[in-house]
Amino acid sequence: MIKKNTVIKIIILILIVVSVSLLIYVNQTPTFLTKTIKLFNKNYEYNAPSYELVNHESIFAEKLSDNKFIISTHEKTEVLSQNLKNEATMSFSGEKPTIKTSNDKFLIMHKDTNKALFVDGSKNIPVNCSGSILTGAVNKNGYFALVTEEKGFKAQIIVYNKNGKELYKWHSAENYITDVDISDSNDMVIASTVEYGENKLKSKILVFNTSKELPEEVLIDNMAVKISFTGNSKFVVIGSESISAYSTSTKMLWQKSYEGKHLIAYKLKDSKIALAIGTSNLATETSSVYLLNDNGKEISIFENKGEIVNLDILAKDVLIAGKRELKVADENEKFSLPVGKDIKKAMFSTNNKTVLVVTDSIAQIVYLK
């Protein structure tokens, strides 16, 4: 027979678990908290976290792996908590900031400069190159690659370790590089280049093993818009007319054509790929939003009406940011919310109901219903 004290302890434990779970839910779901308080106070309004952006023509925002955000302008770069409180500031400034991230590590670059800043926690490593930096990439281990435009060469790729030490360098007078990525194994690099075909632009993918002098090559019959490793030995090419995947030995693994339609928006995240494909990106048009795994298998398709600014992924949900509207969908629409200002970018925060919205004047956490 169970003792009375044991029963009481079990009941107390259950109450603690339920209370903690409810506290977490309420903390991450302010709409629930707001509705509850409004039962007693009809005038109550929840003040969502926000971050003011004053007259910045060029703003770059991205999410880090630990529910933090990074926002960069021509004046500074800041790491913000999930409540948009400042946690770190980098006074690395310049026009048109671009940031490449991997987990909690990031690489800051500015257009037409020869300087970059690699940040790993409290460690800031400045990098000076001999030519203007075109683009770059960083992996989860803190190894990073920079593409520069050199005098006498159309492009140069430089690979660095996590301490900023140069490990590998390659240059070419024949290739103009548009994108680059570095594998988490630290020893593989891919780069996309512009090729001039008959009546249209194409791309060539260069596959580097840093232990070898020359890369392998893959010719793509359309323009590569984005390239990304999805494992140490395979990568995805999002093109203007199709998406495809290859092994690092240059074997095609799968391909999906857009069937004559246009690529409107895309997102690669957590071994998943979101693509918006349509005839045009007008408010009156309908586009298909696909969610694929890295083997090319369809997870969901959602028919979206309206303009699309950008996409984001969380588990099996896709965030669709329109010009003034947010939607979360899988095969069906789950949540939506009109936004009173033009959206420049939006991304998931802590869950699929919590979104960071960036406009010209403010970055703000909003809660979908």
Image (spheres, rainbow, N blue to C red):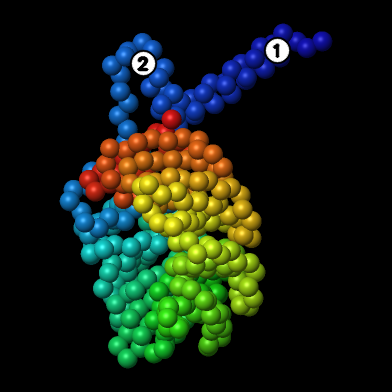
**What residue is drawn where x is 63% and y is 73%?**
252
**What residue is drawn where x is 72% and y is 8%?**
4
Horizontal relation, residue 321 to residue 291: left or right: left
- Give how far apart the Cα atoms at labels 1 and 2 are: 37 Å
On screen, 201 above or below 71?
A: below
**What residue is drawn where x is 30% and y is 81%?**
131
Q: Residues within 10 Å of mark 2 (few under 14, many from 20)?
A: few
Residue 333 visible in the snapshot: yes
Q: Residues within 10 Å of mark 1 (few under 14, many from 20)?
A: few
Question: Callout 1, which amino acid?
Answer: Val
**What residue is drawn where x is 61% and y is 16%?**
12
Hey, which residue is sitting farthest top in the picture?
4
Q: How many marks?
A: 2
Q: Position of residue 245 (x, y in %)?
A: 59, 68
Residue corresponding to mark 1: 7
Residue corresponding to mark 2: 38
